[in-house]
Amino acid sequence: MHAQETTFSKLVQGEKQFQVPLYQRTYSWQREQLQQLWDDVLELVEDQLEGRPSAAHFLGSVVLAPGRITAGGMQRWLVVDGQQRLTTLMLAFTALRDCHRERGTDKKAARIHDLLLVNSYRDGEDHYRLLPTQADRDAFTACVESLPKAGGPGNVGAAYRFFLGALTTGEESGGEGWTDAVESVLSSLLSIVEITATEGDNVYRIFESINNTGVGLSQSDLLRNYLFMYLPTRGESVYRNLWLPMQEQLGPENLELLVWLDLVVSGNSRAKQSEIYRDQKKRLEPLSGDESALQAEIDALAQRAGRLTRILEPELEEDPELREVLERLTRWGGQTHYPLALHLLDLVDAGQTTASEAAKALAYAESYMVRRLFAGLSTTGSNRVFMELPKELEKDGSAAESVRRYLSRNKTGARVWPGDEAVREAIRTRPFYKFGRSNQRFQVLRRLEESYRPSEPVDYAKAKLTVEHVLPQSPAQQWFDLLAEEAEDGQGPDELHVLLVHTLGNLTLSADNARLSNHPFRRKQEILDSSALRMNQGIAAQERWGRAEILARADELAERAVQLWPGPIEGMVYADDEWAGWKELRAALLAMPAGTWTTYGDVAALIGTHAVAVGQHLASKSGLHGVHRVLTADGRISAGFHWTDDEHSGAPRTLLEAEGVPFDDAGRARRAHRLTTADLATLLGKEVSDEISPSHDLDDEQQTAAARFEALLRDNQTPETVEGVGGVLRFWERQGGHSAYGKASETSCFPTLEVGNALESRKLWPLAIYPVTGTVEAVFQPLKRRPPFDDEPLRRELMTRLNSIDGIDLAEAKLDLRPSFPVEVFAGHSEEICAVLEWFVHTVALSEARRPIPADDGSARF
């Protein structure tokens, strides 16, 4: 075998083809892996634009085996390992080519197409420089050839749409120079080790050995071994007195975290957790001959271990003010604030600042994150902001004002700290319930409730409170009758409901979700009035609950919010002439798979505005990608639709049909292909309500939930449907599964299968059954992250089997989402549904039989 370092452009140059063999799995990178790569690319782009020298980023290895040379001399290579990286970069360049085409820089687009994507003078399959597995081939070639179905469902289409959206958004603020820098980084600054097999090598055995290795040493293990190699006389004492207590205090995972934070707080704001050992070794190499200096470094690390423990377990912090804000940040979740918090504790313990000053600084950090959640801004880039903050604190005597000044000074929209007016408007209009993590939404409502300063504080640990909609998500007709009284001209009550239901003004905390359910407001009043929460008592005091009351409460909560979470320094706020909602609209259109459509109302609810405003905006802006996919509420092309640029012509229906959207004789797009507000949020990578994340412990709470589900099913569905659902669930239990139940007011049911062993277990569920709304979701979105259904062909087969049942029509374009069908299908087709579930169980069982069993030492055995 031969190995050499190269770049993507050098690897693929010349007339050649890389073919992924059939024994390899399908393309599997998802948003997390794509985002990680893109973050690395953006770092290098920033270096390029600012003229800083930057080393190439190591992307990984590609193992190739020579295939036959075709007539005419084209070399074919088998991709033994590394197809995920190759496919990802090919799709990134495909999206970059299309961005050049949109901008009119056709020569740049042609250069990418001819030199990187295709063999221009070859036909058929030889035309493509990369030939994926057969399961991915059509999706990949659709992107390369710019066919109507480019960017469709599945991981290949999703990756193309991810890069198209990221490039389009970046170019809006960075211009052509930014895009050229991206191309330079992708071509020349992503380092790849090319490993070429020679004649006689068993390429399948190579593939097996690469992908079935045991667990290697962690980054902190490598650092430990390196340090103690240079402590020949003091090593035993230092290990016993410093390293071992620190290791036992934190545990392996948090020790790794500490070693990374130590780099960041020491000034390396670009440190990557995957490269801790390399960076620490580089920093410590000058001390390798000085045992005293190395011991001092380990001693300092051990002291930081104690401070990190106070961050992880805030109850250990002695100062009450600092402890309180650390507790709030812990409940908020994530590690974004860790670099700042650790540096502040360094300063406090060194006597360079006070605990009160540190608490104020962290409160500004908390406000930055909360206000961005209100405004619906992406969390992308926030980690980098907080990794750079420790360096900023050295420049000012006041830690708190230094943090506030730095966060107020951001120059780009990706880092903006929303001001008071932006927060007020967002609270009135944005669907707060649909964004952020569930624990973050809960913490916002908790702190708002605490701001009323009740005489008897609530014990949140025991209260079992959840977020509740006052105006229900699935309201009865009398709620719509109420909304009809307040609907504006051209607005139906259903559209008004979509605009209001998920806003902060309509949300509260309650332990009575099951009792509140979808009842009329009079019934909810009685329950809320008995609540110990002041915000619930305020809602119960209203005579009615409609648009006026929801907006009035939103305004009242907004005033509390701007006081609880102070904003940026006035005059330093990022100024942007364009409302952030329109940027989000463009991102949503870019994220939509080919073969789907949405409505003006769904988009309006996503960005927090009116459907009419969305229609006017789409009609006035030229060059918007995917504008033809936004239809009226009944699935028709708007009567006023017209193309706003010179690039498009013809009937939008013709284009939609070419993408895979069927229309009926009345000109209505098939509803199975429609994307809801929640679907759009999912495609944008926003965490939506976790109503389909079941609790699987069959404790008293779950038994109560089971009874509630059955009661709701009997009250809302026909006896035939009830019997059909019950028969399917009983069959599921005979297959070894069990039923788990959601925690929302409409108690949902999940036929759940637990697989694995004591060392490694996971849970899968193919369906989610909603007894009140009468829908059943095929939960492809969570399945795509769980073996074996992370393999796309298996999800497609599950969809095909379900679609073979009369009454089920799941659109292929929604393969990565949660398409639904009526629960009434259970009434006449329970045996067919059971057959699909039996196949599901059998597929999982076969997969488990082939999986390696983890050994006690962390390696794999078969």
Image (spheres, helix red, strand yellow):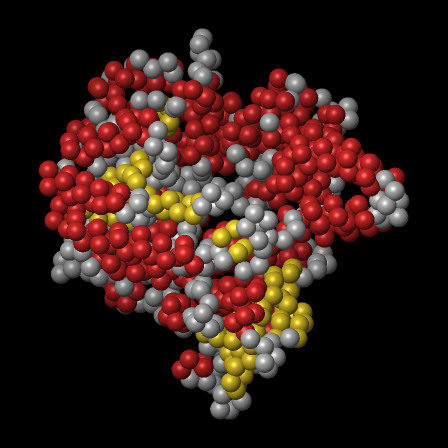
Residue 848's spot in the image, x, y percent?
41, 54
Among the 4 quarters of the image, the one containing residue 667: bottom left
Q: Which residue is farthest bottom?
A: 72
Q: Residue at x 63, y 53 (%)?
A: 216
Q: Quarter-wise, where is residue 623 in the image?
A: bottom left
Q: Is residue 300 visible?
A: no
Up the image or down, 360 lies above or below 228; here it is above
Q: Residue 519 location, x and y as percent?
A: 21, 25
> Is 370 on the left-hand or right-hand side of 268?
left
Residue furthest toward the top? 455
Q: Nearer the viewer, residue 188 or 848?
A: 848
Q: Residue at x 52, y 34 (%)?
A: 333
Q: Is residue 87 left or right of residue 522?
A: right
Q: Residue 83 placed where, x, y %?
A: 51, 67
**For this rendering, which residue is in front, 593 or 858?**
858
Residue 281, visible in the rendered structure: yes
The residue under the point 64% across, 68% down is: 193
- Compared with 512, 80 (above or below) is below
Residue at image x 71%, y 21%?
Answer: 354
Say whether residue 659 is left or right of residue 177.
left
Left or right, 208 with respect to 184, comes to left
Count all numbered tags in the image, as a single digit. Answer: 0
Residue 534: x %, y % from top left: 38, 15
| Quarter the N terminus occupies | bottom right
